Amino acid sequence: MELSDVINSRRSIRKFREEDISADAILQLLEAARRAPSGSNLQPTRFIIAQSATAKEALGRSTPYKFIVKAPVVFVCCADLTVITTREHRIGELVKEGAFEGIDVDKNHPSITNSLTMDEEAVKAYLSMNVAIAIEHIVLKAVELGLGSCWIGRFDRNQVKEYLSLDDNIFPVMLLPVGHPDQSPNARPRIALDKLVLKTI
Ligand SMILES: Cc1cc2nc3c(=O)[nH]c(=O)nc-3n(C[C@H](O)[C@H](O)[C@H](O)COP(=O)(O)O)c2cc1C
């Protein structure tokens, strides 16, 4: 499948057939997530994979979107907040790999020192952004595999943390139910291209 076909045919899928997805498909989805880029290559994304009815029902109680229970798998997509402390090490790895070789980088630019003083909320937002990229890799890979998914941002994170006994450093960013689509919705409305670009300078 061409990437443009994947992008154009993707829809948020909220109805799933009662059919499992294979262990190999789950592995392929995880591998797509693993390939995602992340700031300073911090790789904060972590998953809990919910497949049992009990686990999915518990997750279903954390959100108004009860349809997630009917998906064969729900990925609880989390950020490991501790990775922020590995930045020097990760940047070191990138340097070793030659990522910046021959690249013009101003090491004294203020944005470099500013980013070292992020508060807890800023770190959470920054790492969540990185998790979002990995999620969209899964979403697009799922389309290629004939599967559907739906981002779920509206859920009680504390309830999920408690149910899963998550360490305080593991922040649940999104739920992502994945399964065989039992609907083929039309494309949802989008703003016009001329609204997308504020200016060309
Ligand atoms: C960050 C984010 C959070 C979302 N949260 C929810 C949600 O809680 N419940 C839901 O049904 N859909 C959710 N969606 C799906 C959007 O409603 C959907 O992407 C949008 O309406 C466009 O439709 P489409 O994905 O079919 O193109 C979310 C999407 C994103 C990207």
Image (cartoon, grey):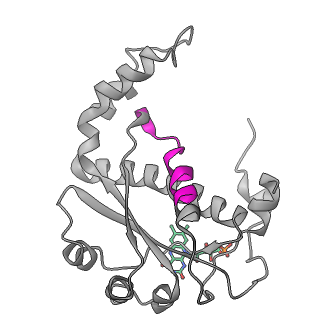
State which image quarter holds ligand 1.
bottom right
| Residue at x-position 24% and y-position 80% | 159
Instruction: Tell me: 49 left or right of 148.
Output: left
For the question of whether residue 8 can be seen, the reply is yes
Q: Position of residue 36 (x, y in %)?
A: 53, 45
Q: Quadrant of residue 181?
A: bottom right
Q: Residue furthest top?
A: 102
Examine the residues drawn in magenta and state their main secondary structure.
helix
Instruction: Tell me: 5 left or right of 16.
Output: right
Q: Residue furthest front?
A: 23
Q: Nearer the viewer, residue 10 or 21?
A: 21
Q: Is residue 77 above or below residue 20?
A: above
Q: Position of residue 186 (x, y in %)?
A: 79, 81
Q: Quadrant of residue 18?
A: bottom right
Q: Is residue 42 above or below residue 9?
A: above
| Residue at x-position 35% and y-position 20% | 92
User: In the rendered picture of this protein, how many numbered marks are placed on residues?
Assistant: 0
Q: Position of residue 109 (x, y in %)?
A: 40, 19
Instruction: Tell me: 23 left or right of 3.
Output: left
Instruction: Tell me: 52 left or right of 133.
Output: left
Q: Is residue 113 magenta?
A: no
- The image quadrant where one finds the N terminus is bottom right
- The image quadrant where one finds the C terminus is top right
Q: Which residues are magenta?
A: 27-40
Q: Position of residue 128 (x, y in %)?
A: 39, 55
| Residue at x-position 63% and y-position 80% | 13
Q: Is residue 167 above or below residue 36?
A: below
